[in-house]
Every structure is written in C-alpha cells, then in structure tokens.
Image: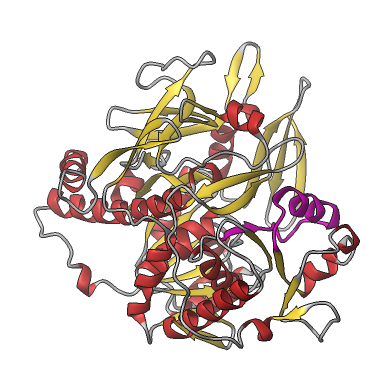
C-alpha cells in the first residue's frame, strides 16, 4: 500500500502531469508549488459558473444555486467598485451566515483582501482588529453590529453594511441595497502574492496576529486537497490490482459547515475545495449534534467532521448512509476516534488534515486504510511542502526523532500584518516554525506529539499532553478531555464525563 502510494505520488507530480511540482521564487526564497495552479482565487470562482443549476449554499429553508451565487457575487463586486473600494483594499466580514461566502468571493475576485473577523470577539477585541487591519468597509450581522455599536465612535468614517438586520438602522446600509446593482463581474488581474485574506490567530499570549494569506497559498491549498484525494484513491486501487476510480461517476460533494468561516478549516479547506468541485455547502448557525444528524439525512451530506456526532444517543435513529468521509480538523484526531468512525459509520472512512492558519490550510492529509493503519499519524506533507523536524538550535534531527516541525512551500503565509518582529520569529529563510513537536517515519508520515508550549517537563523527562489525552480517550466513560501543564508540581486534567465537568489534580 505504501509502495503504491510512493509510485502514484511520483507519477502525479512529474513533469506534464496534473499535479506537476515546480520551483518558484517568492520573497527571495525558492519554494515548491504546483505548475498548473491558477494565479488567483478569481479563476477558481469563475470556473465554478459551469455548475450553474446545482445547489451551492443551503441555510435552513434558503437555497442558492451556483447561478444565484454568481449573480450576487457580481452585484456585490459592482457595488463595492461604486463605493471606491479597489484592488489592494481590505473589507472586514463579521457574521455567522452563508452570505459570508458571497462576500468573500466578491472581494477576492477583485483583489480585495477579506479581513475575517472572529465572530466571538467582544467589542474591545473587535476594535483592535479593525484598527490593525484598517478595512474600507465593515459588513456584519445583527449580533456583531451590536458589538460594533459599542465602539463605533472610534471609527467615524468606516461605512457599515448590515446583513439580516432585525429592522432598518440609520447610518447602516442594508445588504439588500448592495444586491440591487447586478451586472457582470468586473475585470481584474490579480498577482499570486497579493493578500487574499487576513485571518487572525488567537495565539497564547498578547494580541492576536493577522496572518496574511496570499492567493498563491490559498490556490495551492485547494490543489493539495485535490491531490491527496486522487493519490489516495489511485494508490489503494493499484495496491489491490484494481483500475483507478472514474471521477465522472463520483457523488457530488455535500459538506456541512459547522466551524466558522473566519478560519481556514471551514473557508479554505471545506468551502473552497467544495466550490471547485461543484459541491453543496450546508450552513448551521450554531452547532448542535442532534440538528446535524437531521441535516445529514435531509441534505445527503457526504463529508463531515465531529467526535460529538458519533457519540450522540440518537445517532442510530438517523440516516447517515450518504456520509463518505468523517474527519477531524483544527487539531490532531485522537487515535481512538479513527477506529470509532470506521466501526460506527458503515459507509464512511475516517480522514483528517493537519495544518495551520499560517499555511492557508493543510500541511498533511491522511484517510481511509492509511489512517486506520496509522491512526496516530496525520499523514505525509503535501507535495508543495518541504518538511523537517529540528532541535532547539534549528538543526534537523535524525529520522524518527522528535523535534519541532518546520515547513516551507507555496502555502506559507506572507507574514503577520504590521508585525515584522513576529514574522521574523516565525519564518526563517522561508521555513515556518509550526510550534508543534513531531516525528517523521521512513515513509514520510508525520506524527504530531504535542505543542511545544504544552509539553510538560517532569523529573527531566518530557511528558506530551497529547499522548496522555490519547490514553484517556480509550476509556468509554470519557467524552472529552484536555491535558495541560501549569508552572507547578501539579498537572490538572479537565475531563468531561457523561454529563458533568470535573477537574482532577494529578
């Protein structure tokens, strides 16, 4: 199986093939990238017009076909142009509704960078984000508008568009006005290294940092998603002496978006990949596992991510036969969950992608038989990445040894907005310091051991919190757990049992 993967990998990335890898010069560094990658997200959006009458966005009883979405995206782009918002400017989006994606595509197709506002920010955090990113426009729903109203005196010249407001508000432009203009999508020529969006990373201390995700990085991330799906299916077929699957008979993707669109998991990995393939995106305003089961049955969802779903007491009461992939994202999937998915969801295979905001999405991916065979791995680094594990001095450690994972490639961000010092601390000669402790095996599969800052030192020995969590998750009575260190002789465990939260001192 692994030999077949290596063979297929080399074939797909060789000269003249769909996923040919080349070297390009970016910010003074030679990096790996896909030779066939379009220059910007605009080309990806334009290509999706071919799916015309397919469902694209679904929210409760509302639906947009691809034609509907292209109509609205063009109207938004034309309206922004009339307001004097131009290529190189920024627009902040703060909401929980599917209009997020319409606004996103309207901006990136014109070379306008989207500022993804964390929908949970309180007023003071929102003020910081707006001051730091200096957008020419804020677009928000009612809940985010209420928070902005607490600080609006600090931004007297910032125009505001309201989406799904309870009632008209003086000084706030209703979204319906934005959609009135219509017309064709304005022309634009976008450089691959222009900012596509600014996504704020929470970090562990201090103010969040605005990561500058470029068009090159975002497009290469989508191609990574396509590459891994192709490589995995073709290698498994070859290992079993079967012909490769015919993509023309593959089911149309349908994803349930349960994580925020101001993160790369939902926006760059779920939404962009699904859009490129002509799939359907179903939105939930707030997460509820029971409601998710109903939506999966009704909308015939094919891909989903959640531990809570398969643990829900009503799981067996709902039709989940449409599911093909049940995955995790945002953190390493605990090994026990891989087997639970494979046993519980009869039609689906487990999968995951490990990545960061700072890599525009995934660094690695794994799924199916590969994941079941190596449930503690997050898979190999994608073809447009170089990867290595290093010691505290930045020296590469021997294969199989533990060190901080560094990666270099087309998906690495330009830097942090207005934070030259933080950028220099995080990116060295094009190499991104992930902050994750990892090891690599002989096949190039990566195993995330812990976050450097989470690692516990006891008696001179390293204790990796993720490994302790993995053991706890094997106990059926434990639903969720988090292990972390504190600067003391004690280690606390936060454990969620059946219906109660407990703190344990060890």
Q: What stretch is highlighted in magenta?
A: 112-136
Residue 345 seen in this snapshot = no
Q: In this view, does 235 lie to the left or right of 264?
A: left
Q: Is residue 57 left or right of residue 445?
A: right
Q: Quadrant of residue 67?
A: bottom left
User: Percent position (x, y) of residue 256?
Assistant: 51, 70
Q: In which quarter of the image is residue 301?
A: bottom left
User: Percent position (x, y) of residue 46?
Assistant: 38, 71
Q: In this view, does 76 lie to the left or right of 185?
A: right
Q: Nearer the viewer, residue 301 or 211?
A: 211
Residue appearing at x 49%, y 78% in the figure? 318
Residue appearing at x 68%, y 51% in the figure? 497
In the image, residue 66 above or below residue 303: below
Q: Which of 81 and 175 is in front in this view?
A: 81
User: Percent position (x, y) of residue 152?
Assistant: 87, 63
Residue appearing at x 46%, y 81% in the figure? 184
Magenta stretch: includes residue 116: yes
Q: How many marks?
A: 0
Magenta stretch: includes residue 439: no
Q: In which quarter of the image is residue 278?
A: bottom left
Q: Which of 376 and 191 is in front in this view?
A: 191
Residue 7 seen in this snapshot = yes
């Amino acid at each position: 199986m692994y030999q077949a993967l290596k063979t297929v990998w080399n074939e797909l990335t060789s000269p003249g093939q769909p996923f040919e890898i080349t070297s390009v010069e970016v910010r003074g560094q030679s990096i790996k990238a896909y030779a066939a990658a379009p220059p910007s997200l605009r080309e990806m959006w334009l290509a999706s017009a071919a799916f015309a009458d397919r469902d694209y966005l679904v929210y409760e009883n509302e639906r947009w076909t691809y034609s509907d979405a292209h109509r609205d995206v063009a109207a938004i782009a034309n309206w922004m142009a009339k307001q004097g918002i131009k290529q190189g400017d920024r627009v902040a989006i703060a909401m929980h509704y599917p209009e997020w994606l319409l606004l996103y595509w309207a901006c990136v197709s014109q070379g306008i960078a989207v500022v993804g506002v964390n929908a949970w920010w309180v007023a003071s955090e929102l003020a910081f984000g707006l001051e730091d990113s200096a957008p020419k426009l804020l677009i928000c729903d009612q809940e985010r508008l209420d928070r902005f109203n607490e600080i609006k005196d600090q931004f007297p010249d910032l125009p505001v568009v309201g989406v799904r407001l309870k009632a008209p508000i003086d000084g706030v432009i209703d979204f319906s006005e934005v959609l009135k203009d219509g017309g064709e999508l304005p022309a634009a020529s976008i450089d691959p290294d222009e900012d596509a969006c600014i996504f704020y990373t929470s970090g562990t201390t201090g103010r969040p940092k605005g990561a500058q995700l470029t068009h090159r990085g975002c497009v290469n991330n989508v191609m990574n998603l396509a590459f891994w799906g192709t490589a995995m299916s073709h290698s498994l077929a070859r290992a079993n002496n079967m012909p490769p699957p015919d993509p023309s008979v593959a089911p149309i993707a349908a994803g349930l978006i349960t994580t925020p669109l101001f993160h790369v998991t939902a926006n760059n990995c779920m939404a962009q990949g699904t859009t490129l393939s002509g799939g359907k995106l179903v939105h939930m305003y707030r997460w509820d596992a029971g409601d998710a089961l109903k939506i999966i049955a009704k909308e015939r969802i094919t891909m989903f991510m959640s531990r809570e779903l398969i643990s829900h007491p009503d799981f067996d009461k709902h039709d989940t036969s449409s599911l093909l992939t049940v995955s995790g994202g945002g953190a390493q999937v605990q090994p026990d969950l891989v087997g639970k998915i494979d046993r519980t969801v009869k039609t689906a295979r487990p999968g995951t992608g490990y990545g960061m905001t700072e890599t525009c999405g995934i660094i690695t991916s794994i799924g199916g038989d590969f994941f079941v065979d190596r449930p503690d791995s997050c898979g190999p680094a994608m073809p447009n990445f170089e990867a290595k594990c290093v010691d505290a001095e930045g020296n590469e450690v021997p294969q199989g040894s533990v060190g901080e994972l560094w990666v270099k490639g087309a998906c690495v961000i330009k830097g942090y907005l207005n934070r030259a010092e933080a950028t220099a601390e995080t990116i060295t000669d094009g190499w991104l310091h992930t902050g994750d402790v990892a090891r690599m095996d002989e096949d190039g599969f990566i195993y995330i051991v812990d976050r450097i800052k989470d690692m516990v030192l006891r008696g001179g020995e390293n204790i990796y919190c993720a490994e302790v969590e993995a053991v706890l998750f094997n106990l059926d009575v434990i639903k969720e757990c988090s292990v972390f260190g504190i600067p003391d002789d004690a280690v606390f465990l936060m454990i969620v049992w059946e219906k109660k939260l407990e703190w344990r001192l060890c």
